[in-house]
Amino acid sequence: MQLMVVKNYHELSLEAAKFILKKIRRLPTITLGLATGGTPKGTYENLVLDYERNQTSYRDITTFNLDEYVGLEPTHQNSYRCYMDNHLFNLVNINKNNVFIPNGNVSDLEKECKRYDQLIKDKGGGDLQLLGIGKNGHIGFNEPGTSFESTTHVTELTLSTREANARYFESIEQVPTHAITVGLGTIMQSKEILLLVSGESKKVALARLLSGKVDEHFPASILANHPNVTIIADEAAVSKGG
Ligand code: PGA
């Protein structure tokens, strides 16, 4: 794992966008795995700014999002479909037929998980996966204890995750209890991984990840087994001396 430490969130967002843009320019048909949450917002903002200035084309790109809440309509303002439309997809020239997000609002969730996992496999696992990390070490919504072999599946969100995401809802009771997430085994199939870590609240998680100890109780630790991982972290997320 390669670690790049930058001054603050602003720099992290610029560097992450530069990293992704370089890949897109090199491979205009790239398959990207995308993440939601607070951390990648600035990255998407910079991608959109670049699109306005330089018209980098998304026409031939395919994207797979990592996760989606169970039980929210795709049009719900807190669905990850809506997040992606508002932060990226509606603002660049991406072909929406090539945009994939699990649908957490179907009656047969198992079937949806299988379908979604197969779509990613059909794309060879993808070229570049963008990730954030939870305080408890989750990546996607793979909570502690998730099998390293897991494929796309339905997961019960931990209290810590629901508390962290309650800021987007009126109350914690409204945060869905379950989500569909791409599994750890599927994430590991991506040829390359870019993990963004920002802020003091992620310090403990980042230190644990960098210790290199691989343990299913800390899902992100599986990344130590991937041959091509870049971590961009800001100074607030990096422990002194580490
Ligand atoms: P955050 O979420 O970017 O909103 O901190 C990251 C995550 O939970 O994976």
Image: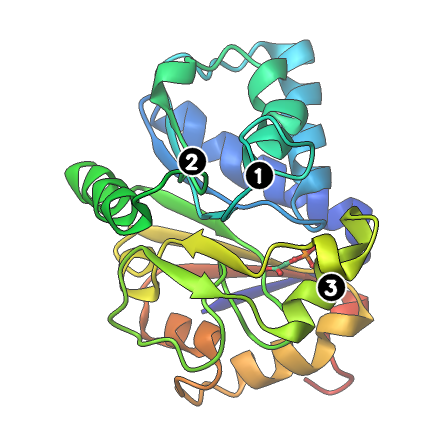
Note whether ligand 1 is within 8 Å of mark 1.
no
Residue 168, above or below 103: below
Of 44 and 167, which appears nearest the observer? 167
Q: Which circle marks residue 80 in the picture?
A: 1
Give the residue number, with chain letter if any, for mark 2. Answer: 101
Instruction: For the C terminus, give its image quadrant.
Output: bottom right
Label 3 CA crowd tier, 10 Å (few <14, some 14–19, many 20+): some
Q: To which quarter of the image does residue 45 belong?
A: top right
Give the spatial CA distance, label 2 vs label 3: 22 Å
Q: Amino acid at mark 2?
A: Ile
Q: Residue at x 18, y 43 (%)?
A: 118
Q: Amino acid at mark 3?
A: Ala
Of 77 and 27, which appears nearest the observer? 77
Q: To which quarter of the image does residue 186 belong?
A: bottom left
Q: Do the CB atoms of the residues marked 1 and 2 lie less than 8 Å apart? A: yes
Of 200 and 83, which appears nearest the observer? 83
Note whether ligand 1 is within 8 Å of mark 2.
no
Q: Which circle marks residue 164 in the picture?
A: 3
